[in-house]
Amino acid sequence: MRHRAPFAGAAVFAFGLACGGPPRRPSAPALTPQTAGGLLNYSGEAQKWLTYVRGQDPSCTYNVDLPSQKTHQTEIDLSNIVVCGGHPAPIQYQADVSFAYDAATNAWVIKRFSS
């Protein structure tokens, strides 16, 4: 009877691994406002647009209001990201951006920027 105990423990361990195993790693880490802002700062297209808009109204900037990311989505689309003086910018200054998680580089990137 004593010889079966190690085998029983191994069987329980193997069953535990087969049923659940270690928790899965999320498909993408959450996109933070700091990361999103950094991506916009390093995007040539986004910077050109913000330079143009600030030439018209120096109080304008990008406002990245991210949705909840509890589901670990790999793409996030944001509309009307320009604010001027703390209020939504006029339609002619608005811009949209799509962020995507690049699994090959393990980093968020700008998939699309449109103004």
Image: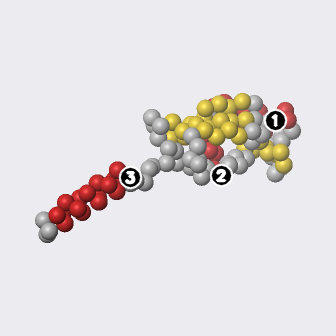
Would residue 96 be found to the left or right of residue 21 on screen?
right
Query: Residue flagged by tag 3: what amino acid is it?
Result: Cys
Judged from the image, the secondary structure of the residue bearing numbered disc 1 is: helix
Labels 2 and 1: the sequence-earlier one: 2
Query: Residue flagged by tag 1: what amino acid is it?
Result: Tyr
Q: Which mark is on residue 71?
A: none
Would residue 50 be found to the left or right of residue 85 on screen?
left
Residue at image position (75%, 30%) is 115
Q: Position of residue 26 (x, y in %)?
A: 49, 48
What is the C-alpha distance between the residues marked 1 and 3? 53 Å
The residue identified by callout 3 is 19
Q: Position of residue 8 (x, y in %)?
A: 23, 62
Q: Is residue 15 visible?
A: yes
Residue 83 or residue 2, whichever sits in front: 2
Residue at image position (68%, 49%) is 67
* Circle nearer the viewer, 1 or 3: 3
Q: Position of residue 68 (x, y in %)?
A: 65, 52
The residue identified by callout 2 is 68
The residue identified by callout 1 is 93
**How many numbered marks, from 0 up?**
3
What is the C-alpha distance between the residues marked 2 and 1? 26 Å
